[in-house]
Image: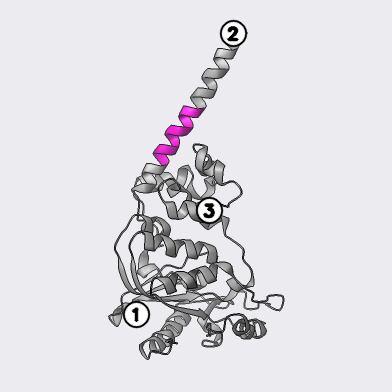
Amino acid sequence: MKKFLVFIIKIILTIIVSAVLLDLAYTLIDLNSSKRYKIENVYNTKNRSFDVVFMGSSRTQNHFVAQLFNDKGIKAYNFGMSGSKLDETALLLKLMLERHYKIKNIILDVDLNLNSNSKSPGTQALYMPYLHFSKTIRDHYKNKEDYNKLLYIPFYRYLVNDNKIGFRETFFSLIQKKTNALDNYGYFPLRGEGKNMQYDLSDYAPKRNYAYEEIRDICKKNHINLIAIATPMCQECQSDAYFNSIKSVYPEVHNYENAVTDDDCFATCGHMNVKGATQFTNIILTDFIQNKFRN
């Protein structure tokens, strides 16, 4: 019996030590990688300065051609992240400020994310490697249901987020394999046109969003000019009622829902292709240069 207990204890200790070593290895790799995704790029860089940053979900990532701003001498970058919600965007902004970024203007696409206060588990996972090293990330997730497990159980945060920060992703980070997430100043171009060109937003309703209000408060505190906007949808989308009612909740949001309407400007109903994004970005650029966003 004694030998059996010793054997069990050895197995348990081996598992614990292995988990600790794996946790350290994975984390060290992520701490030294900045070429794959926007979150790790922000975490592993400091003291960057921008005239304009674009923030939001895929409707930011696919709709703002930052190159057009840079061509005008306006230093810009697109930090939009596919699948993210405003909660993850708020954390990204806080992480930028923790890393001493200097930002003059933020153009934030809020539109469809004002429908709820939901969060994106997939995007949250990308913050987990830095949980022990960033007070900003810890504070942001301190009320998360499994926060103590994520913080105190070695390798747990990698196991439960294996599809995002597991072995495959860690290996690619180790060999410094780049993705296209950081190409084109963060803008991801969509090709083709006319797929899924109908969308019904009749069940959507803009409502108070706490993450957006946190972003707004952070910008005010740090003297950043926040430009909240709604970006275009295709003509067949049942969206006018939703977009028009945004101003009843947040009057400061600029509605560009119908700024681009031609079907050949859309890859899908909710995402513009290169032609549409270029046309739309030029509209925003003109309005920015003409100072139309100042309150």
Query: Mark 3: which amino acid?
Result: Tyr
Mark 1 Cα-neighbour bin, 10 Å: few <14, some 14–19, many ≥20? many
- Viewer-proximal residue among 268 and 227: 227
User: Residue 2 shows which numbered tag?
Assistant: 2
Classify residue 140 as left or right of residue 38: right
Q: Nearer the viewer, residue 88 or 73?
A: 88
Of 42 and 237, nearer the camera is: 42
Task: Describe the element under mark 1 as helix, strand or loop.
Answer: helix
Q: Is residue 248 left or right of residue 99?
A: right
Please identify the quadrant where the N terminus is shown: top right
In which quarter of the view is residue 203 placed? bottom right
Residues packed near mark 2 inside 10 Å, few (<14), some (14 to 19) or many (20 plus) = few
Graded by Cα atoms within 10 Å as few (under 14), some (14 to 19) or many (20 or more), the crowding at tag 3 reads some
Residue in view at x 30 percent, y 65 percent: 48
Residue type highlighted by circle 2: Lys
Residue in the picture at 52% in, 57% down: 123
For disc 3, the marked residue is 141
Question: Sequence-wise, which precedes: disc 3 or disc 1?
Answer: 1
Q: Can you see residue 127? A: no
Closer-to-camera residue (221/86): 221
Q: SS for tag 2?
A: helix
Which residue in the protein does label 1 denote?
Answer: 69
Q: Earlier in the sequence, mark 2 or mark 1?
A: 2
Q: The C terminus appears in which quarter of the rendering?
A: bottom left
Q: Is residue 234 magenta?
A: no
Write down the region rendered in magenta: 16-26
